[in-house]
Amino acid sequence: MDCLFCKIANGEIPSEIIYEDDLITCFLDIEPETNGHTLIVPKKHILNYHDLNDDTLLHIQKIVKKLYPMYQEKLHCDGLTLSNNAYSAQNVKHYHLHFIPRYKNDGVKYLSNQDILKDIKEIKSILKKL
């Protein structure tokens, strides 16, 4: 398989691994948003969030809960942002969770294109139909 994250998880490509077990590898992002920006990646090739089984998803969340206090203690972060992308929004086509420690005044802004946003009442109306 020619997948960057599979190669990292299998030790074929060097990375700065923070945590690893039989199911996942956690390594520092080479293009971090903040100090400690970590990617949590299943060792098994899984395309995106929708393909995750519940056991892997739960395991990833347990690791997040385990890692966060360590990052607070060691990096003195003030908060945490978790994010993932699916399909065309993924740069690497292998599921990964961005574990982004947040710091007061870190300057990280997740901007949206205000010009294309619908009114929240319209969004509620659309989603209510689900």
Image: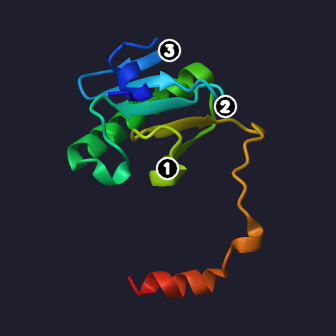
User: Considering depth in this image, is 31 or 19 the residue closer to the camera?
Assistant: 31
Colouring scheme, one of rainbow, by chain, secondary structure, one colour: rainbow
Which kind of residue does numbered mark 3 sit on? Glu
Above or below for 84 versus 9: below
Residue depth check, mark 3 versus mark 2: number of the one nearer the observer: 3
User: Considering depth in this image, is 69 or 34 the residue closer to the camera?
Assistant: 34
| Residue 100 spot, x, y in % from top left | 57, 36
| Residue 84 spot, x, y in % from top left | 48, 47
Which kind of residue does numbered mark 1 sit on? Asn
Residue 75: image quadrant is top right
The structure residue drawn at horizontal position 36% and vertical position 13%, both measured from the top left corner, is 11
| Residue 112 spot, x, y in % from top left | 71, 60
Quarter occupied by the N terminus: top left
Which kind of residue does numbered mark 2 sit on? Thr
Marks 3/1: CA distance?
22 Å
Mark closer to the chain start, 3 or 2: 3
Check whether the beta carbons of the residues at disc 3 and disc 1 lie within 8 A of each other.
Answer: no
SS for callout 3: loop
The residue pinned by badge 2 equals 34
The residue pinned by badge 1 equals 85
Relative placement, left or right, of 32 versus 130 is right
Local crowd size for mark 3, using a 10 Å CA cut-off: few (<14), some (14–19), many (≥20): few
Check whether the beta carbons of the residues at disc 3 and disc 2 lie within 8 A of each other.
Answer: no
Marks 3/2: CA distance?
15 Å
Relative placement, left or right, of 35 versus 55 is right
Residue 63: image quadrant is top left
The residue pinned by badge 3 equals 16
Relative placement, left or right, of 110 versus 3 is right
Q: Quick check: can you spot residue 5?
A: yes
Mark closer to the chain start, 3 or 1: 3
Check whether the beta carbons of the residues at disc 2 and disc 1 lie within 8 A of each other.
Answer: no
Above or below for 117 versus 24: below
